């Protein structure tokens, strides 16, 4: 580990430069660099809100084609917002990364601070930092280079050693740098139009359970057989409608599940992360093996059963009421008896007694 650290420092030295300590009261232009996954984008909102409270004049967010949707409905009170889209970093070429950084400097000037939110020790992040050349940079991956603020030390320790929840490390990062203290939480801004079309599609029932069975990777995706088993348990234990939350890849499975069970539904609208978020926002309970959907549920404080393969402490459920099940490497090794007990525990915490469970009130299409 020490050898790896030393080698990375030597490799990154050509990209380093002398940063200066900034006074938050004099900072006017900030950049958040996060061309990554949806959950990663949702985790940086403590940074966004702290900069907003500081009344930074201009905030630029460099997002990926995938997570740009998280910021599309974001509005700030007294801070100008610019969202720049680039290729997901894993697939972005060096020329594109340099171009994005150079264009920011050319168009908007030298940033006072760049928050390198990718949380990756790689050449692509260092190239961006080197070409942007903000007055100072924040990160939590533990790099001790001249271009990074000394304020990174404590939050980097939280991330690298204690593996603290990511929104918490960003909240502490901003506090350590002298910016306003904010709550460590996920957010997903959602416009009223999306919410309205989803409510119209569902008839806006007063109670339903949102079930997500797929994630961005295979280790977070239930097989059709396991999805059937989970729905069977749900239908036996709780008598409220189930709405399937899925993306384009999961459409065929969702259609199959809707055909097999009464009171199990899906949106007929074209799948999108915003529509999935709207379903989650109105749900009474959410169940998911995917951290992106989990973070959306956390953003709206929806009670959730989170099912993990290879649990990662940096990405926990952060809503007021949640239950967690951890399986091994294969998400389909979920123990149905454990799932049943967890669902019952959630029902007790929500005061869902048998009579209440069977009283699905309100007119709806479900």
Image (cartoon, rainbow, N blue to C red):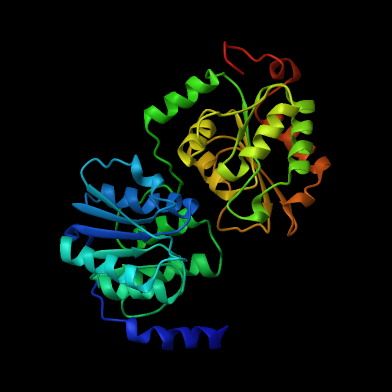
Horizontal and vertical percent for residue 99? 27, 68
Rendered view: 191 above or below 336: above
Horizontal and vertical percent for residue 278? 48, 32
Q: Is residue 341 left or right of residue 190?
A: right
Rendered view: 253 above or below 264: below
Residue at figure coordinates x 56%, y 18% from the top left: 205
Rendered view: 259 above or below 84: above
Q: Is residue 46 left or right of residue 133?
A: right
Query: Image quadrant for the N terminus?
Result: bottom right
Residue 111 seen: no
Residue farthest toward the right in the current orientation of the protein: 337
Residue at figure coordinates x 54%, y 39% from the top left: 297
Along the line of sight, the residue nearer the viewer: 258 or 120: 258
Residue 322 is drawn in which quadrant? top right
Residue at figure coordinates x 48%, y 39% from the top left: 272
Residue 312 is drawn in which quadrant? bottom right
Query: Image quadrant for the C terminus?
Result: top right
Along the line of sight, the residue nearer the viewer: 147 or 110: 110
Along the line of sight, the residue nearer the viewer: 350 or 257: 257
Horizontal and vertical percent for residue 81? 25, 48
Q: How many marks?
A: 0
Residue 30 seen: yes
């Amino acid at each position: 580990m020490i050898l790896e650290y030393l080698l990375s420092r030597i490799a990154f030295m050509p990209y380093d430069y002398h940063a200066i300590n900034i006074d938050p009261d004099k900072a006017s232009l900030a950049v958040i660099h996060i061309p990554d996954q949806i959950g990663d984008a949702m985790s940086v909102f403590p940074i966004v809100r702290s900069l907003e409270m500081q009344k930074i004049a201009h905030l630029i967010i460099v997002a990926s084609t995938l997570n740009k949707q998280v910021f599309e409905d974001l509005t700030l009170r007294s801070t100008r917002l610019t969202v720049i889209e680039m290729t997901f970093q894993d697939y972005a070429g060096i020329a594109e990364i340099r171009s994005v950084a150079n264009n920011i400097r050319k168009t908007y000037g030298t940033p006072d601070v760049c928050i390198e939110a990718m949380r990756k020790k790689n050449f692509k992040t260092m190239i961006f930092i080197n070409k942007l050349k903000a007055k100072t940079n924040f990160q939590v991956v533990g790099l001790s280079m001249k271009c990074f603020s000394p304020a990174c030390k404590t939050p980097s320790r939280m991330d690298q050693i204690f593996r603290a929840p990511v929104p918490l490390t960003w909240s502490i990062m901003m506090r350590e740098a002298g910016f306003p203290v904010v709550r460590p939480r996920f957010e997903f801004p959602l416009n009223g139009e999306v919410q309205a079309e989803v409510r119209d599609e569902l008839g806006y029932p007063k109670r339903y359970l949102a079930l997500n069975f797929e994630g961005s990777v295979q280790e977070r995706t239930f097989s059709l057989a396991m999805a059937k088993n989970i729905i069977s348990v749900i239908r036996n234990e709780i008598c409220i409608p189930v709405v399937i939350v899925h993306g384009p890849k999961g459409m065929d499975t969702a259609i199959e599940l809707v055909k097999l069970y009464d009171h199990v539904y899906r949106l007929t609208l074209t799948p999108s992360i915003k529509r999935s978020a709207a379903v989650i926002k109105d749900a009474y309970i959410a169940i998911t093996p995917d951290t992106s959907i989990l973070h959306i549920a956390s953003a709206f404080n929806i009670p959730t059963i989170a099912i993990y393969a290879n649990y990662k402490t940096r990405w926990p459920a952060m809503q007021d009421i949640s239950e967690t099940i951890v399986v091994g490497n294969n998400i389909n090794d979920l123990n149905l008896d454990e799932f049943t007990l967890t669902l019952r525990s959630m029902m007790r915490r929500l005061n869902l007694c048998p009579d209440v469970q069977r009283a699905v009130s309100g007119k709806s299409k479900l």
